[in-house]
Image: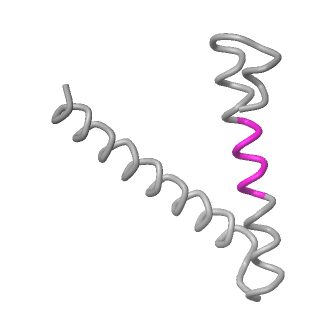
């Protein structure tokens, strides 16, 4: 959300996506330190979990939007 305070439009979206990717990668790296799994596996797992959560949230919002409209 922070990039939207300083930028607008496409630049804010790109900055937000990049900062999210960096944050997810850092969380994946931190997770790999505690689990003993590979760094790339942990980063991919973090991206996968986040993508699944986003897809579910979008789907529920889309269904509710159709019902409430």
Q: Residue furthest front?
A: 68
Q: Quadrant of residue 39?
A: bottom right
Q: Which residues are magenta?
A: 18-25
68 lies above or below 13 = below
* In this rendering, position of residue 46 left or right of residue 23: left
Q: What is the x, y in percent for residue 24?
A: 71, 55
Residue at 44%, 57% in the rendered image: 52
Q: Nearer the viewer, residue 48 or 40?
A: 48
Res 58 → quadrant:
top left
Q: Kindly identify the residue that appears in the image at 72 percent across and 21 percent down.
A: 4
Image quadrant in which the C terminus is located: top left
Reply yes or no: does residue 6 show up in magenta: no
Q: Residue extending furthest top?
A: 9
Q: Main secondary structure of the magenta part?
A: helix
Taking depth in this image into account, of 31 and 64 the one nearest to the observer is 64
- Tell me: 8 left or right of 65: right
Residue 2 on image: x %, y %: 78, 30
Image vertical order of residue 47 relative to residue 18, above or below:
below
> Could you tell me residue 1's position as x and y percent?
71, 32
């Amino acid at each position: 959300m922070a990039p939207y305070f300083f930028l607008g439009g496409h630049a804010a979206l790109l900055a937000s996506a990049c900062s999210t990717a960096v944050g997810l990668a850092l969380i994946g790296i931190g997770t790999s330190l505690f689990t003993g799994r590979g760094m790339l596996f942990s980063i991919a797992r973090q991206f996968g979990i986040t993508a699944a959560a986003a897809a579910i949230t979008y789907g529920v919002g889309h269904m509710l939007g159709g019902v409430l409209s």
